[in-house]
Amino acid sequence: MKRILFVAFILSCVFFEARAQSEAELYAKTQVLKKERKCGEAIPLLLKMLEQKPNDTKLLNDVGWCYNETKQFEKAITHLQKAIQIDSSNATAHAEIGYSYYSTQMYTVAIANLNIANTYQPKTETTLYYLGLCFVRLNSKADAVKKYNELSLMNSSYAGKLLDEIKAMK
């Protein structure tokens, strides 16, 4: 009896180790696909992983990012909102959903989320750039210029792009 229990224990350990290893390999594959901008291939794998771990904010962030990359903004928003519900201080989700809202012309909601992202992490060039673009779209030149100035202080390549948008304002 002890021998049977021991064998069962060993087999269960091997099974769980193999499963954990295959999950890690699958996640690593999704990261390679993301880096190669092959989000159409990464999304089904990430969704499969989410079936096993539906509250994994890192997976939710990744799915949201991939949906944004494939211009499926509503799907991105759904997954990123869930990530934010699980962890309201998830700066990555706030930044990514800010981009989703910017892309769907919901500029004030985008601004709110991008500002939240900046409170939970150091300001990034990307969040400042999209904040600036939101202000341009809302015709708030003074606020757009402030974001341009912040980008300039960071020596960001986005500063020139934002300045071009500001100059094009009426």
Image: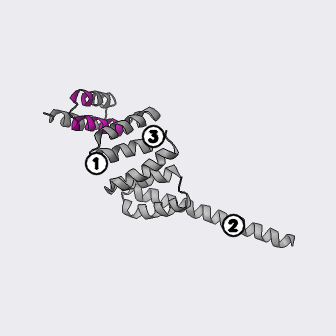
- N-terminal of the pair, mark 3 or mark 2, is 2
**Residue 125 seen by the camera:** no
Q: Residues within 10 Å of mark 2 (few under 14, many from 20)?
A: few
The quarter in which the C terminus is drawn is top left
The chief SS type of the magenta part is: helix
Provide the residue span drawn in magenta.
126-145
Q: Amino acid at mark 1?
A: Thr
Q: Which residue is mark 1?
A: 104
Q: Residues within 10 Å of mark 3 (few under 14, many from 20)?
A: many
Q: Is residue 105 left or right of residue 122?
A: left
The answer to whether 19 is drawn above or below residue 84 in the figure is: below
- N-terminal of the pair, mark 2 or mark 1, is 2
- Nearest the viewer among 94 and 36 is 94
- Nearest the viewer among 158 and 59 is 59
Kindly check if marks 3 and 1 are in contact, taking CB atoms under 8 A apart as contact. Answer: no
Comparing labels 3 and 2, the label whose residue is closer to the camera? 3
Q: Residue at x 52, y 62 (%)?
A: 51
Comparing labels 2 and 1, the label whose residue is closer to the camera? 1
Q: Which residue is mark 2?
A: 14
The quarter in which the N terminus is drawn is bottom right
Can residue 133 be found in the magenta stretch? yes
Q: CA distance from mark 2 to mark 1?
A: 47 Å
